[in-house]
Every structure is written in structure tokens, then in C-alpha cells.
Amino acid sequence: MKISISCFLAGILFGGGLTLSQMINPEKVISFLNITGNWDPSLAFVMGAAVTVTFIGYHVVLKRKKPLLVDKFQLPSFKDIDTKLIFGASIFGIGWGIAGLCPGPALASLSFGGINSFIFAGTMTLTIFIFRYLSAKILES
């Protein structure tokens, strides 16, 4: 139960931060990405704050022998940069630049009920399921 409550609170905090910073506003994100036009650098401060908090947080938390609510840390072990990573990151970046949303802000924007958010989140979810289905079929053969 403690894990569920902490996940819920972390989600509320994350969604609130996305909303406060306007990262759920596609026009704001696209203005940040448009460095040759009417550029809005304000999201660079959001990114800088997020990187700073993450950097400090990892250094403080990883000094502990174990997390507060589970038995061990679950850190990624794969550290190679491969074709799948580059291709996936490229697709993610292109989609983010076109739509002005990435998965976290897209889900947070659902709370405002805009049709574009629902279309984006629905399409994103469908694409995830298609990818998983096709990946499983490819691995079977």
C-alpha cells in the first residue's frame, strides 16, 4: 500500500510540475524547439531544474544500501548505444517536435480534456501495442 501511495503522490507531483511549467501545452513546446523562429527559451530553465534535481537526487539516494519501500534498487544494466536506441530516440524526437507532446505531458494533458490530447494518447497507446505485437512476431520467427 505504501508503494501505491508513493507512486500516486509522485505522479501528482510530476503532473503538477508538467502543468506548472506548461509542458502540456504543445504550442509552448514547439516554440521552445523553434530556435530559428519565435524561440521561447523558458523550457530550458525547466530542463535545467529537472537535470539538477535528478543529479542531486541520484547521488543522495544511491548512497543508501536499499530504497525505502522495496528490497533493492532497479537500475538499468544495459549501457550500450545501439541501432534500436538511436532509431527509437530519433522517432521519439521527431514525434515530440511534430506534436509538441511526449508521453508524460500527453497523459497529464488528458486532465484538461482537449480532443488533441486524447487523439495523441490513444494513438500512442495503439502504437505501443502494435510495436509489442510485431516485436513478439519477429522474435518468434
Image (spheres, rainbow, N blue to C red):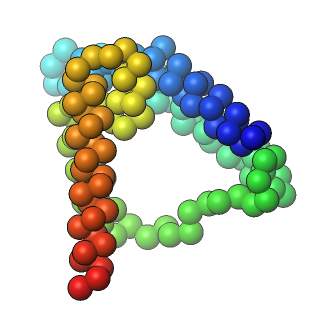
- The structure residue drawn at horizontal position 62% and vertical position 41%, both measured from the top left corner, is 55
Placement of 2 over or under 32, stated as above or below: below
Q: Nearer the viewer, residue 40 or 9?
A: 9
Q: Is residue 29 left or right of residue 73?
A: left
The spot of residue 111 in percent (x, y) is 41, 19
Q: Nearer the viewer, residue 79 or 102?
A: 102
Q: Is residue 7 left or right of residue 86?
A: right
Placement of 7 over or under 137, stated as above or below: above
Q: Quadrant of the N terminus?
A: top right
- The structure residue drawn at horizontal position 57% and vertical position 31%, both measured from the top left corner, is 11
- The structure residue drawn at horizontal position 28% and vertical position 69%, both measured from the top left corner, is 135
- The structure residue drawn at horizontal position 70% and vertical position 34%, both measured from the top left corner, is 5
- The answer to whether any part of residue 41 appears in the image is no
Placement of 109 over or under 87, stated as above or below: above
The spot of residue 101 in percent (x, y) is 30, 31
In the picture, residue 50 is in which quadrant? top right
Residue at the extreme right of the image, as rendered: 65
Residue at the extreme bottom of the image, as rendered: 141
Q: Quadrant of the C terminus?
A: bottom left
Q: Nearer the viewer, residue 90 or 132?
A: 132
The spot of residue 33 in percent (x, y) is 25, 28
